[in-house]
Amino acid sequence: MDEVKVIEIKKSIFDDNDRDADALRSELKKRGVFLLNLMSSPGSGKTTTLIRTIKLLKDKIRVAVMEADIDSDVDARKIKAATGIQSIQLHTGGMCHLDAEMTRQGMDNLALDGVDLVILENVGNLVCPAEFDTGAVRNAMILSVPEGDDKPLKYPLMFSICDVVVVNKIDVMPYFDFDLEKCREGVLMRNPKARLIPICAKSGEGVDAFAEWILGEVAAWKA
Amino acid sequence: MDEVKVIEIKKSIFDDNDRDADALRSELKKRGVFLLNLMSSPGSGKTTTLIRTIKLLKDKIRVAVMEADIDSDVDARKIKAATGIQSIQLHTGGMCHLDAEMTRQGMDNLALDGVDLVILENVGNLVCPAEFDTGAVRNAMILSVPEGDDKPLKYPLMFSICDVVVVNKIDVMPYFDFDLEKCREGVLMRNPKARLIPICAKSGEGVDAFAEWILGEVAAWKA
């Protein structure tokens, strides 16, 4: 294809977020609480995936959820109604991501005694959440089939920081030009250690593999 | 559903972006150039929609495109190869949106003589791009069916600032629980003047209505 003009435009951001994130992680390690940061585009099926996953986990470990959203509280309500677990909503007031300080504000509002795992559902966005360490022990993301298999090429930072990429809506793969192997190659190019887990949150297919990955990570963190 | 705890966490942002945006718009008015800011989630089909739309426009008006992306230049290349029009890529260096100053940097790199319409493909993100006036004359967004009809509820600012909402991938509506009327209600709740245009960028269905809306707006701006 033709050559095109490329202009580099940028702003810089400075803060102490990395230090805050490390401090939060150390504290979580001491308390034996695992924090999972779950990211995705809008509409990828984060909440449905979470509900399925929590149902598989909640008899084995104690789980709590923090739902970040610009404005609404429908997700936290949905999770609580469907699973009965402790679920709070974080309003970001228009902010496009959570940083470690914002995550800590959320954690301070959870009853953490006896809790093994806190899942943070980050703001639906493939860009900004990747730039800010929340203090989580692991990062996971959900990529849904209709978004396309080229997303690892277009959102490099997001895919490079994720330990696991859950590929959701595999039931509609026949209707989209989505190549799972091409997607896997893209994911591994960004992070050779990343794990890819294809699921259908609607039917529950594959969700057990995601739940088992979480259980393994939680056990390792608490060991 | 059950009540859940809601915590307001926020940061504030101050800058002169509104002034810069107004200045850019005044300049464009003088030069008779219309700038359209096109936003969406990742994977909604922005580039495919653009190619279809430009093919309908390019014999009637002179069009140029600025493709904003974190890192790659595949979109600008695709547009140029498919339509032959002037197309440049803006690398945001990790930034999640474009502001008016960044947009101006892009405009300064276009040959604007004789150009009637510049389309800015903003970064794939439903949050941050809505917060920054780019200096565009109109804002459009693409919402794709797999993302769900509840997005106007979850991304209020984006839907409140868009003059037109293009609903893409209507061919897969039978496979998703997407209610076009519910979506329309949500869009109109955020912005009663918004226009909703259902399309299938893959087949071209409905794209003529989007192209005609653009032609009308460009003519009004240049009048």
Image (cartoon, coloured by chain):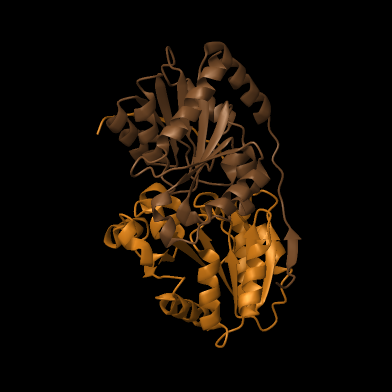
Chain colours: A brown, B orange
- Vertical comparison of B95 with B4: above or below: below
Residue projecting furthest to the bottom: B59
Q: What residue is drawn where x is 39% and y is 47%?
A: B154
B97 is higher (above) or lower (below) than A46:
below
Seen from the viewer's position, the closer of residues B67 and A83 is A83
Residue A88 screen position, x and y as percent: 39, 28
- Residue A223 position in % (x across, y down): 56, 13
Left-right relation of B151 to B64: left
Instruction: Name the residue nearer the viewer: B2 or A119.
Output: A119
- Coordinates of residue A220 in the picture (x, y in percent): 56, 19
Q: Is residue B23 visible?
A: yes
Give the residue displayed 51% in from the left and 21% down from the top.
A218
Horizontal arrangement in the rendering, residue A187 relative to residue A168 (left or right)? right
> Which quarter of the figure has residue A72?
top left
Where residue B27 appears, as percent x and y from the top left, is 65, 71
User: Which residue is situated farthest in the left direction here?
Assistant: B1
* Quadrant assignment for the N terminus of chain A: bottom right
Inspect this view and state whether residue B194 appears: no
Say which residue appears at 39% left-offset and 19% top-offset.
Answer: A60
Q: Relative to residue B123, is residue A189 drawn left or right?
A: right
> Which is nearer the eye, B210 or A150?
A150
